[in-house]
Image (spheres, coloured by chain):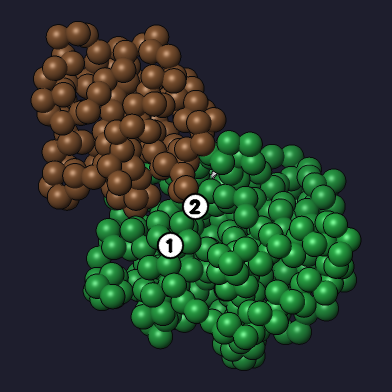
């Protein structure tokens, strides 16, 4: 519980250590997250996604600087893919944010996607809570918009910025339709390259088909590398939050997200309670043997496992 | 679950290319580690602050400029100021034999000179991180 108190007091190393515990599925992290939960909900959480190399980190760096100038504290979670073969990862987003490192109002954390389905989204939600309770005003989550777990993350943020680059007509198609539908702000970065206006027009056309109530996603151009177009993006980030608050979409979306989160957590702990604890008396092995020998079918076997779980109840050990 | 070892690979000093650091980063990734790569021309202050935020187990610094006698000990000094004693710090690059012992005295755990097989420093990290 010590950790929770230290975090709320603004202890940076406690924050760093708590994130490690969350990432490692350490049970101690849950205890801390419970204790800090009613201090969360104040931060504006922003997802930055788009194809590899589009300039997401470069933009995040510049956006953080601009928002910091406006008096805000900023957290950045930068997710890069974990190698499915070795479990290792090269997390290189800090390279583009090097001079934010010693800014006391900014905290950057790199995360590997670590492969477990749904695990990344769950852990990212935990890390967001830690930053939120710590007192950050904005929390950026940078992901490469390709996999399902990235889509899951994007769904859990307040504002999603989709970063595109000129001449990626086919790539726009390749980006998951799901993400296209939930982008709240579209940025065509690298507008110094040829074709930026065409890409913007293509995006506008695609967005015409979207049925949004009250918010028309703006399509903005930027040259992240040269700090051009950044103020405009920040203005729209603020405008989007205003819209969410005034339309009560914020309350609605957060309730929906919490609902999903409860389901996910319940599923996760059910799995632990049913299988990890169950395996101690070898029930699964015994049933598997029977099912393999055709003495029983897997449906009945599964019912049996559930029944013995219900009889046993939840044992925390 | 076995959690991956987190290593910050940084390149302090003003010399301009990072091929060596990138080779090291890839070797560590292939050994199953999470490598936080911070890029070129990092100050000791940036390296230590990034190591804190990323909660790494190890800082691996690569250097070519010959400024190691100043930069490596400065990193150790900053870690001490922050009361951090659970991060393993190692260095690599062209370091003359005579300089190695003074660097170790300053707290750098090991120095790997060019030509060291990658397995040597991978195993060194695995065996020496403080958990
Ligand atoms: N021409 C041009 N290049 C840019 C611009 N913004 C960023 N870049 C360059 O694009 C490259 C990729 O930038 P990053 O910010 O690392 O892109 P990213 O989307 O974070 O990349 P990943 O995290 O690897 O997916 C770098 O070489 C940047 O310097 C821009 O506005 N114009
Ligand atoms: Mg990036």
**Mark identifier at residue A82:** none
Left or right side of A174 for A59:
left
Q: Which chain carries label 2?
A: B
Mark 1 falls on what kind of element?
loop
Percent position of residue B29, x then y: 51, 33
Q: Between A292 and B89, which is closer to the camera in this rendering?
A: A292
**Mark identifier at residue A26:** 1
Residue A48, quarter of the rendered image: bottom right
Q: Residue, x 57% and y 84% (percent of image)?
A: A313
Mark 1 vs mark 2, CA separation in Å: 9 Å
Q: Share a chain, discs 1 and 2?
A: no
Above or below, B36 against A28 in this view is above
Q: Between A106 and A188, which is closer to the camera in this rendering?
A: A106
Quadrant containing the N terminus of chain A is: bottom left
Q: Is residue A105 visible?
A: no
Q: Is residue A147 visible?
A: yes
Percent position of residue B43, x then y: 27, 36
**Within 8 Å of ligand 2, the CB of disc 1?**
no
**Chain for colour green:** A
Mark 2 falls on what kind of element?
loop
Quadrant containing the C terminus of chain A is: bottom left
Residue position marked by numbered label 2 in the rendering: B1
How many numbered circles are shown? 2
Residue B77, quarter of the rendered image: top left
Left or right side of B92 for B77:
left
Q: Residue, x 48% and y 68% (percent of image)?
A: A126
Assess disc 2: are there few (<14), some (14-19) or many (≥20) residues with their C-alpha within 10 Å of its C-alpha: few
**Chain for colour brown:** B
Left or right side of A68 for A225:
right
């Amino acid at each position: 519980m010590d950790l929770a108190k230290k975090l709320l007091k603004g202890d940076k190393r406690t924050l760093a250590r708590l994130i490690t515990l969350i990432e490692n599925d350490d049970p101690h992290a849950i205890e801390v997250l419970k204790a800090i939960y009613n201090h969360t909900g104040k931060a504006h959480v922003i997802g930055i996604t788009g194809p590899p190399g589009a300039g997401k980190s470069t933009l995040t760096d510049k956006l953080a600087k601009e928002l910091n100038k406006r008096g805000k504290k900023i957290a950045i979670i930068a997710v890069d893919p974990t190698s499915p073969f070795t479990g290792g990862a090269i997390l290189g987003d800090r390279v583009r944010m090097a001079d934010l490192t010693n800014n006391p109002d900014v905290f950057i954390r790199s995360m590997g996607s670590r492969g477990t389905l749904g695990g990344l989204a769950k852990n990212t939600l935990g890390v967001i809570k830690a930053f939120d309770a710590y007192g950050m005003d904005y929390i950026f989550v940078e992901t490469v918009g390709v996999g399902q777990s990235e889509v899951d993350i994007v769904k859990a943020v307040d504002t999603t910025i989709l970063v595109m680059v000129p001449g990626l007509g086919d790539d726009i198609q390749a980006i998951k339709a799901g993400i296209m539908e939930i982008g709240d702000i579209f940025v065509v970065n690298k507008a110094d390259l040829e074709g930026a206006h065409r890409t913007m027009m293509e995006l506008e056309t695609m967005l015409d088909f979207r049925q949004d109530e009250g918010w028309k996603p703006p399509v903005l151009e930027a040259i992240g590398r040269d700090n051009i177009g950044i103020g405009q993006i920040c203005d729209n980030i603020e405008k989007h939050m205003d819209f969410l608050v005034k339309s009560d979409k914020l309350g609605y979306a957060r309730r929906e997200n919490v609902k999903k989160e409860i389901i996910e957590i319940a599923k996760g702990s059910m799995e632990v309670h049913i299988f990890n604890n169950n395996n101690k008396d070898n029930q699964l092995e015994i049933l598997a043997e029977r099912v393999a020998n055709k003495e029983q079918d897997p449906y009945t076997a599964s019912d049996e496992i559930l029944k013995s779980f219900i009889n046993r109840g939840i044992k925390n050990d | 679950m076995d959690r991956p070892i987190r290593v910050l690979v940084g390149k302090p000093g003003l010399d301009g290319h990072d091929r060596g650091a990138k080779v090291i980063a890839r070797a560590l990734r292939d050994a199953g580690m999470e490598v936080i790569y911070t890029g070129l021309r990092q100050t000791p202050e940036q390296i230590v602050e990034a190591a804190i935020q990323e909660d790494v187990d190890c800082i691996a610094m690569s250097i070519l400029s010959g400024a190691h006698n100043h930069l490596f000990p400065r990193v150790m000094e900053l870690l001490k100021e922050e009361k951090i004693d659970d991060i393993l710090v190692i260095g690599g690059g062209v370091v003359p034999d005579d300089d190695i012992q003074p660097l170790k005295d300053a707290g750098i755990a090991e120095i790997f000179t060019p030509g060291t097989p990658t397995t040597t420093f991978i195993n060194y990290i695995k065996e020496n991180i403080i958990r």
